[in-house]
Amino acid sequence: MTSLVQNIPYKDNDTQSANDTKPAVLLRPRDAAPKIKKNKEVSKRKIKGRSEDSSNRTVNVRLNAIMWNSVFREHQRLHPNCNGFLQWNMEREEKFGFVNREEAMCDKCTYRSRKFKLYEEVQTKKPGRKAAKINVSAQAALSQTPLGYTGLRKIVLGCNMPAPSTSGLQKRANKVLPEIVNIDKKDMKARRKQLIAINTLRGRKDPGSVSLQADGAYNNAIYSGIGKTPFQPATQVVYSVAEAETEDKSIIGVVCKNKLCSVHPIKSGEKCTSACSSNLTFMKSIGDEYTWAKEALQDLASDGIEAKHLTTDPDSSAYRAADDLYLENTTSTEPEHFLDTRHFLNNHRKNIKNDKELGEIMPGRTKKDREKLLNNFALDLAERCQSEFTQAMEIYGGDFVKVKNKISFTVDAIPACYTGNHELCRRHSFVCKGGKSSGCITELSYQTVLKSENWMKT
């Protein structure tokens, strides 16, 4: 019997093998049965049982019709007596991302067609293979959604379709995304010129002095890491500046910053270059809205746009950037600061919630009950003030002078309303008209104590 072990450690019990340093290797025994050669019938049966026949593909309807009309005519001309079944030759399929090139075959005769492109190409003057339109448009859509390549592949595979590789998607993104950036910059410049033209037609003496609103968006909330990490939780920021002159509220300025770099780790201490995806150092504060706003306003000033009115959230330092540009004589228009009502609502709610004197007069057996009532009251009062301002702006068509005059009387009606006295509401409120069907909540658990003089003093 043939030994199945190679490099036996010991030849016998007394003599040590010369190959004792090599490990023992167990060999697989060879099959004694003769090998059967594959014939054409076996290969045909294998092709018929293909698993790809039940899968799906993305094809262009017009090009697919052209392919099969050409295949039917050619097969009938070359094999007039064949009544075989024409289908795609999946073994010869060529895939490019979401698209593919296909070849037709007959299951009875030897007919094989040429390969057809079932996708439209992007027409360029560059040599080489052209990119498929669907691959380019998919990257454009991915740039506007939070979906990543892994999630996209799961969706495509779940539809029983061959998914493009992650490396292929990234390679295509590296070519498409810079083009999107250039298109966006050209579009924003066109919108700036259009805004100046609109103000010129309106008869403005200085059509470049416009009303702007600005704010930053982060991939993670800035304050979400308090008590959890000494670092800032956000690694990406997009600071946007929109015009407030038209109903479109178009974005005319964008500043993008990020700390994401896979080439230079933080521990290495190396600085990122212009070739890196990161454009911020690790030590730079990503919440520095003063710097981002100044960069955006300088870009706008290069096209003749200056901030006459600047609306920001209350805790932002963007207004100081606009004011400093004016003091530095970079811009010739002195900016006026306005607060964003949505952010002002949140600040208003927090201030009411943190009022200790108001918390003491809230009814409740325990401190937890009083805090719950105070939280509900803060939310309700903040929403009430926001609703009053929104309705006033809608009724007076955005005329801030009239709104300011009317709101001064509404301020006196709101405290009286919470005490149950709706006399002033009927004359000055935009939300509560004093009746049972007015929509105003007349019975709240904290209204009993609000009727006292302590509430009016607070």
Image (spheres, grey):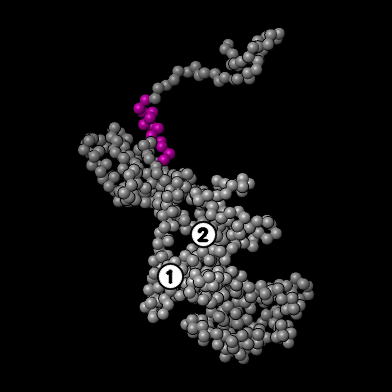
Across and down, in percent, residue 267 comes to: 63, 46
Mark 2 neighbour density, 10 Å: few (under 14) some (14–19) many (20 or more):
some
The residue closer to the viewer here, 133 or 319, is: 319
Image disc number at residue 304: 1
Residue 69 lies in quadrant: top left
Image disc number at residue 256: 2
Across and down, in percent, residue 68 comes to: 28, 44
Quarter of the picture containing the C terminus is bottom right
Q: CA distance from mark 1 to mark 2?
A: 22 Å
- 265 up-or-down from 211: above or below: above
Name the residue at 63% across, 73% down.
347
Counting residues from the start of the chain, the first of labels 1 and 2 encountered is 2
- 72 up-or-down from 9: above or below: below
Name the residue at 41% across, 40% down.
52
Q: Which residues are magenta?
A: 39-52
Name the residue at 40% across, 50% down.
135
Q: Secondary structure at mark 1?
A: loop
Q: Amino acid at mark 2?
A: Cys
85 relative position to 286: left or right: left
